[in-house]
Image (tube, coloured by chain):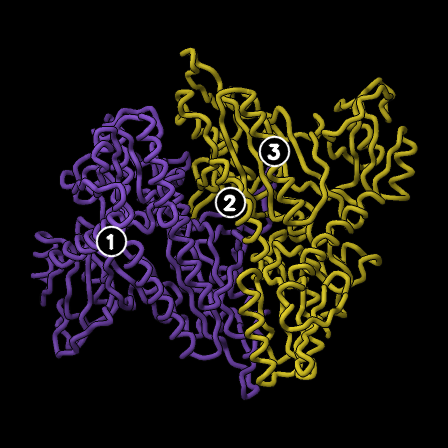
Chain colours: A yellow, B purple
Amino acid sequence: MTQLDKITPRDVDFSKWYTDIVLNAKLASYAPVKGTIIFRPYGYAIWELIQKQLDLEFKKINVENVYFPLLIPESLFNKEKEHIDGFSPEIATVTRVGDNQLPEPLFIRPTSEVLMADFFKTEVKSYRDLPLLFNQWANVMRWEKTTRPFLRTSEFLWQEGHTVHDSKVQAHDFTLKILNIYETFVREFLLLPVIMGQKTQKEKFAGAHSTYTIESLMYDGQALQCGTSHYFEDNFSKVYDIKFQNKEGKLEYGYSTSWGVSTRLIGAIIMSHSDDNGLVLPSKISPIQVRIIQIKDTDEVIKISESIKNMLSNKYRVDIDKTDKSFGFKISEAEIKGIPLRIEIGPRDLEKKVVVISRRDTKEKMEVNINDVEKIVDSMIKAYDENIFNLALENRKKRTTSVNSIQEYKDVLNSNQGFILVPFCGEVSCEEDVKQQTSTNSRCIPFEQENKNMKCFNCNKDTKMQVYFARAY
Amino acid sequence: MTQLDKITPRDVDFSKWYTDIVLNAKLASYAPVKGTIIFRPYGYAIWELIQKQLDLEFKKINVENVYFPLLIPESLFNKEKEHIDGFSPEIATVTRVGDNQLPEPLFIRPTSEVLMADFFKTEVKSYRDLPLLFNQWANVMRWEKTTRPFLRTSEFLWQEGHTVHDSKVQAHDFTLKILNIYETFVREFLLLPVIMGQKTQKEKFAGAHSTYTIESLMYDGQALQCGTSHYFEDNFSKVYDIKFQNKEGKLEYGYSTSWGVSTRLIGAIIMSHSDDNGLVLPSKISPIQVRIIQIKDTDEVIKISESIKNMLSNKYRVDIDKTDKSFGFKISEAEIKGIPLRIEIGPRDLEKKVVVISRRDTKEKMEVNINDVEKIVDSMIKAYDENIFNLALENRKKRTTSVNSIQEYKDVLNSNQGFILVPFCGEVSCEEDVKQQTSTNSRCIPFEQENKNMKCFNCNKDTKMQVYFARAY
């Protein structure tokens, strides 16, 4: 039980609670280089389930996987002014090999637009070569001052998609198609309700024409960006000279996009769904969906455990806890690890032909006839996932406020942290002013807009646009 | 047809032929940083198929996937003397982030024994925690003077397994279990016959107690190491202080292993099976196993193409070449890409209810009744794979020589390059002497031994051991 005692209550210290869960559920450990983490088997298994589903979705729309190098020559990177300005303070740089200084410093990719663009430049010749739809699952590095496992680490794992198209419309549509894939995935698999929208000029990706995003709200009321999809128009193509012969035989710059989600999604899952007893994992990305715990390991209990495991294994990831730990410890461990359902099997229950199934989220327990186990597991998993999603949605609703002035905005920040919807002019200087006053940024211009005449909450200019602001991870 | 013209004949210039295939089959492209490559979709798809199968095999024996960081502090790496001596000239080093010098240089992992050991040190407490069976799919970096796509690149992709056990026997058995998984995979999936054995003292992995290997022979008679499995005994545990309480309650050092295969396997496939027309891919790792090419796209041809594709898709990876290229170009392209079977469908054949199936390896063509397509594809794929394996095996037999003296050895090196089996004393100094005279190393001490009394081929000492030497990639 010692493990359980270590989890700080969520409402006492959210940040400490988060770290306790990461370490106690054995998702990750700290590594020797500051800001880097070790993905332990349980944490990595969640990432593998995320990868598997997204990879499937990408392949359905003909995206092809590739792998581009880790290192980018400094001179190549520096061609795109906005891009280098956005990333350069965070770039880890290789300057020597063994005892030899390199003739040119090499950057560890913070993202791969530049290398992709350099490849597309020679690859793209005609409209017949387009679209080129690439994705890679890779590690990237951005040196961060303040780090936290999964949420912000110097090295992280992600997928980065990079595409080139022969028209603005195609490229822009593709950017949104990916955003929709992200939203569906995050909603159905991670059970996170998100707001879809566009980033403001100030918050868009370095070098992009426009950035689209899905934004979720964590339990503590801080926002987290779950995925972004960038439309570059021909910005990168002009800098890196990506030209194709169009159907009219004329040379035209290609239209490109890039998009990514990362291992910070694991952080989002933790901070949205978990509780004081540990992780609560959405069933679809839970490495173990059902754990069988034997109250006593009699022959009959072992036999029934194995047969229930086999029966459920066609549909679910099931295991039996066969360790020699105490029953109580096994229960706590299943809770810390966020396993959606536990089936407890004991000799006395078996006399009545029943087992006990409990849900991780509500702690609800049910005596179930052995013959009904599969049916009940189906319905309990469904109810479990629905409940988790609804709790996150309710939290977001409770923590979403609409205000019209900077004073009201500041008041809300101090009373009910969360998404704050405001009428906003959209100007960079005005957003910088808000940031200076409140240390908050906009999260997105939601696609859903009321289109009424309003005044910017900060500068009072006329505007029709509503924007979500929030403190964010 | 221009693409085909570019492939240099294999017997004219093997090295140029190899590069031509890599580039023309669009497996990889050169990247801006010397010695790094871009894995293009077709090359990466092969790697994904390799990963999928090996990952399945590892998971069957309870190996868990993890992800450890890219960067290792210099001071941590330098603890293991042999290890650092083996790798240090090849290590890419991060010394700054943005404009700031780092307080300590950070090494980009050339392999992860050190980070794993540092983790195991705190993780391993009791025999109950063991074995720990970890694997990661990751990029690593070793700066090489002479590079070649897939075979030797500064950055490469691989899997690296790292395990800790509570006894020498368990650890050693596990090392060999992995070697057997590699051998089976390489034989069945890549169709490469290999020699299994142990590395000599001179050739073993830096820091290992013993290294086991599978060695294959390329078409040109040079050997290639396809995979290695290292038994460390308690070497790393002593240096990194990995101790556990054994069943008797006493502290004991853990026994560790590591093992890996890399993207150089793709190079091995190319150099073993391909020919003057391009790649020849083993069916199990061919991204496309059957390509349908329409001689004319009449309604009937399109209908039958789709129905054959659907029928075969339950078992095979099938596509239809729907590009507007010429028929001849489509044939050449399917050949360059090494697609095992082509099905050509035309209106005149359809009148006779037949299609034509051709094999990439032998160029054999067969008129097949539409109703028999599935059955014939099954048998042709089987025959195709058998033939490819046998060709590689015959090449190896033809190029394997047994000699007893250094003079004979030198003669063979100049006449029939390949595996050369010699009686060898096994001493490091003697092997260094052979290297100085001939620029060749031993490949392995094969498990199969005759155990007769012999004299070392170089120093004439008594020995019972036979060893394979060869020039190698």
Q: Give the mark toward the camera: 1 or 3.
A: 1
Q: Which mark is residue B382?
A: 1
Picture coordinates of residue B150 (x, y %)? Answer: 34, 45
Give the residue at mark 3: A229
Which residue is drawn at the image coordinates 42% and 45% (left, top)? A100
Locate residue B406 relative to residue B189 in the image: left or right. left
Residue B300 or B174: which is nearer the viewer? B300
The secondary structure type at the circle numbered 2 is helix
- Judging depth in this view, the residue of A154 and B226 nearest the camera is B226
Given the image, on which type of amino acid does mark 1 rest? Lys
Residue A56's label in the rendered image is: 2
User: Amino acid under label 2?
Assistant: Leu
Q: Residue at x 81, y 48 (%)?
A: A395
- Amino acid of disc 3: Ser
Q: Are marks 2 and 3 on the same chain?
A: yes
* Badge 2 or badge 3: first in the primary sequence: 2
* Left or right placement of residue A356 versus residue B156 in this view: right
Q: CA distance from mark 1 to mark 3?
A: 45 Å
Question: Measured along the vertical axis of the image, is residue A136 above or below residue A431?
Answer: below
